[in-house]
Amino acid sequence: AQSVSQHNHHVILSEAASLELGCNYSYGGTVNLFWYVQYPGQHLQLLLKYFSGDPLVKGIKGFEAEFIKSKFSFNLRKPSVQWSDTAEYFCAVNVGLTGGGNKLTFGTGTQLKVEL
Amino acid sequence: GAVVSQHPSRVICKSGTSVKIECRSLDFQATTMFWYRQFPKQSLMLMATSNEGSKATYEQGVEKDKFLINHASLTLSTLTVTSAHPEDSSFYICSAGGKETQYFGPGTRLLVL
């Protein structure tokens, strides 16, 4: 079974600092990759996703992520964070479109706090 | 984006009672919905896949008789926690969508006393 690892559990940054959150997955076949964000008191929202094509994907709110197949990684980045980016970020994997269906396997999440 | 709602948003119940949680897709039809459970400071764990008009598919370790799922229409799936106990206290989240994007409900906080 696939698994997803997020090594940073808590990250504290000052406004305007750059952000990179790590995500590694374990599965040798075709994967679909996602980053979700959960703002305080709100439901999960999709930030960005990768299915195929350009490994550098851009999402909402200035976020981007790069799929590096050789490293089994899909790290999330933002050049300059804002206080409003304070939230919990989840990386998720969907194994293929047929065998795995739409089942998502989530990482443990990274709590980001941006200080003014 | 598509909207998924859950009701109730939070519920407190006594040990031994059953609790029903509803998940609705408000502006689209969903033949498949998913139920997750999230413990404090932990990730979402998939409990089961709810299939419209057929039996749910449960993940390993999830008791199907404990967590009853009914997906009677294309816009509604229900999760019933039967004979709830304090260890069932958790945050339950549903999702629905297509093969590329899942839309998540706001979650239901269950506290069993």
Image (cartoon, coloured by chain):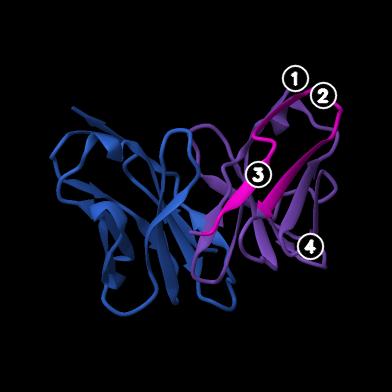
Chain colours: A blue, B purple
Query: Callout 1: residue from which chain?
Result: B
User: Which numbered mark, 2 or 4, is in the foreground of this view?
Assistant: 4
User: Who comes first in sequence, dot 2 or dot 4?
Assistant: 2
**Magenta region:** B2-24
- Alpha-carbon span between mark 4 and mark 1: 32 Å
- Residue A111 visible in rendering: no
Q: Earlier in the sequence, mark 3 or mark 2?
A: 3
What kind of element bears circle 3? strand
Q: Pointer 3 and pointer 2: residues touching (CB < 8 Å)?
A: no
- Return the mark for residue B113: 1
Proximity of marks 2 and 1: CB atoms separated by less than 8 Å: yes
Query: Residue B15 has which mark?
Result: 2
Q: Are marks 3 and 1 in contact (CB under 8 Å)?
A: no
Residue labelled with disc 3: B6
Q: Answer above or below: position of B111 versus A76.
A: above
Inter-mark Cα distance, 2 to 4: 30 Å
The amino acid type, in three-letter code, at marker 1 is Leu
Q: Amino acid at mark 2?
A: Ser
Q: Secondary structure at mark 1?
A: loop
Q: Is residue B42 magenta?
A: no
The label number, if any, that marks residue B73 in the structure image: 4
Q: Nearer the viewer, mark 3 or mark 1?
A: 3
Task: Please tell me whether residue A56 is drawn above or below residue B41 in the rendered image.
Answer: below
Residue drawn at 33 percent across, 65 percent down: A72
